[in-house]
Image (cartoon, rainbow, N blue to C red):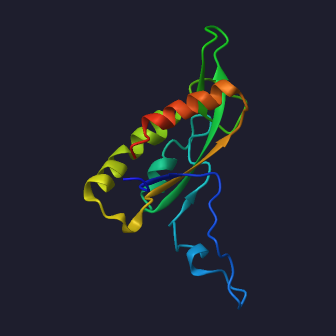
Amino acid sequence: MAGLFFLAAVALPRKTSTLKGQGSPEILPGSRVLLDAHNCYPYHGKWSDRIERALGSGVPLAIEQDLFWYTDKQSGKSWSILSHGKPVSGNEPTLRTYFFERIRPIIERGLRDGNHGGWPLLSLSLYFKSNEPEHDAAVWALLGEYESW
C-alpha cells in the first residue's frame, strides 16, 4: 500500500523540459497537485482553518508544515510544534494533532477504496526551523506511527 502518502523535501521528475523549451506535462501547474499549501498551519493563534481550506481544494495536494523544537522553561519538557519560528508560546499545534489526525479520514478512505490512480493523495514537505537531534528523533518516531499509510 506504499505510495498513498508521500513525504518529501524535494521531488523532481526525470525530464524537466522538452525540445521546444516548454515544461514537460508532468511538472506543469495542475498536472500533479491541485495546490501547494505553503505554511499550512496557524500563526500565533490566527488562521487555524488553513488546513481545512487546503483540503477543500481536493486531492492530490501538497502541504508544507514548518517544525520548531519548543522547550518549556518551567518543566524543561520539549516537543515539536508547528511554527515559522520565534516567538513561540508552546500552545502551537503539533504535527500529530493539526496534520496527521486531520488527514486520517482522507488517507484511510483512500486505502479502503484502493484507487491507485491518484496516489499519492497528499505530499508532505517538512521544513525544520530548528536543528536539534532530539527534534529529528521525535519527528522520525512520529512518522513511524503513520508508516502504514
| Percent position of residue 81, x then y | 59, 31
Residue occupying the point 61% across, 39% down: 43
Q: Quadrant of residue 145?
A: top left
Residue 3, x across and y down, in percent: 44, 56
- At 31% across and 64% down in the image, what residue appears? 115
The x, y position of residue 125, in whole percent, is: 59, 50
104 and 86: which one is in front?
Answer: 104
Q: Is residue 16 above or below residue 105?
A: below
The answer to whether residue 93 is seen in the rendering is: no
Q: Is residue 137 above or below residue 125?
A: above
Give residue 113's quadrant in the image: bottom left
Residue 30 lies left or right of residue 127; in this view the side is left
The furthest residue to the bottom: 20
Q: Residue at x 47, y 42 (%)?
A: 99
Residue 18 horizontal/vertical position (percent): 68, 85
Describe residue 117's horizontal placement relative to residue 83 as left or right.
left
In the rendered image, is residue 52 in sight? yes
Residue projecting furthest to the top: 74
In the image shown, does 52 or 123 lie closer to the viewer?
123
Q: Nearer the viewer, residue 41 or 145?
A: 145
Q: Which residue is farthest left?
A: 112
